[in-house]
Image (cartoon, helix red, strand yellow):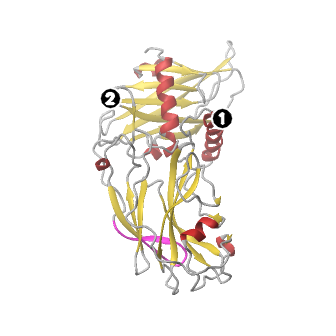
Amino acid sequence: MHDEDTFLDTQFAAYRNELLPNVMAVGPEAVRTTVRRRRRVAVTAGAAVALALIVGPAVGYGALNGTPAPPQPGTSTEPTHTSPASPSPSVVPPESAGATAPDGRISRADLLAARLTLPPWWGDAPCRSEGQLAGAEPAQEGNWLESVDYADVDRDGAEDAVAMIGCKFNNAVVQTQVAVFARNKAGQIVVMGQVLTSRPIGWIFGIDAQPDGSIRIEVGDRAPTAEQPASAIARQWRTYGWAGAKFRQTAGPTSFPPDPALADLRVTATDIVYAALADDGSRHGTTTVTIRNAGPATAEYVLLSLELGENVRYEGSGWSSCTEASSSPGASPPSLSCLLGPMRAGETRTMVLGVASRGAVLTQVSARAAVVRLDSQRDPVSDAKPSDNEAHFDQR
């Protein structure tokens, strides 16, 4: 076991900034995680560092293996006929929308001029939920209207606007969504509903509204990047329809086939219960960490990080299974790191890891364990299912 602080700090900093934005925590711990992530965003934004989550997806929400390339154009664009004059483009929230009216087509110009209230973005993405959309992808951050198509999705005799909207934050495309807008009886633009968000699916490439009112959406299992070939992305067309209160998928695949190049790392950790204060002014405890590679690929290296707060160090024989271990008190957040050797598909490792907290008071109660795969050069690699790459637990 070696103390390779520089290497582990660098690799896990890249992990936090690139991969964790794709991870969405659930339950009460998600609130604490969101607060920590947003604090990190405030720090990294000033330094022009890639978005750190959320978590997250992490993010940020950029792809792990490179800077997101500009989204490829969808197969459908806005029809090129002239729209009739329409009422004021002011927008009201959907809860006060009332019934829609069978006239008043919404043009692209109407959508760009309106102050929209958008359906919620997935997770705690740092995307605005209201305001005007830009007509093109912004340079650094903001929401923009990628494309718009038309279909009578609720079959009331009026064509509704099917909009594909993008969100960019900190110079990275964070998320896209497809939403449908209509006019109410007062002529105001209202949100009918959200059809789909790019998270946690992967990516949205285009929309194609159909004459029968259904909406076809081309999705991919990952975001496009400048470094990877387009053929590496699994793309599908899925069809959605209005079900009276929300949109549901009505046709097309519901999942992507497994990528033989990816591993699915999963981690769990038990609560840490510290013993009474020792004579040296420290308290000692353990957590049982279980890591599983559900496959299908082998993970050349696995990097485990425990975020336990300040003044916590690793100790005991449990860390001897690490190829390298490190205490990183200067990291943000402070963490304990463990580098593990190859893990084959289907392999599970369980470690009882000892920790010591200096002082009687813990700097944080909520703790987190996170794993990321590294390749043979010890560079981070995407995971087949990032949502189970971290686990939240308590210490007391």
Give x and y (percent) for residue 137. Answer: 52, 53
Closer to us: 65 or 303: 65
Label 2's element? loop
Residue that carries the numbered disc 1 in the rendered image = 365
The answer to whether 268 appears left or right of 46 in the picture is left
Residue in the picture at 55% in, 73% down: 107
Residue 338 drawn above or below residue 244: above
Residue 215 drawn above or below residue 84: above
Q: Which residues lie in the magenta part?
A: 240-252
Q: Earlier in the sequence, mark 2 or mark 1?
A: 2
Closer to us: 118 or 321: 118
Question: How far is disc 2 from disc 1 in space, using C-alphas?
Answer: 32 Å
Rendered image quadrant of residue 240: bottom left
Give x and y (percent) for residue 164. Answer: 49, 63
Residue in the picture at 38% in, 38% down: 292
Residue that carries the numbered disc 2 in the rendered image = 342
Q: Amino acid at mark 1?
A: Val
Is residue 94 highlighted in magenta? no
Closer to us: 330 or 280: 330
On residue 297, the disc is none
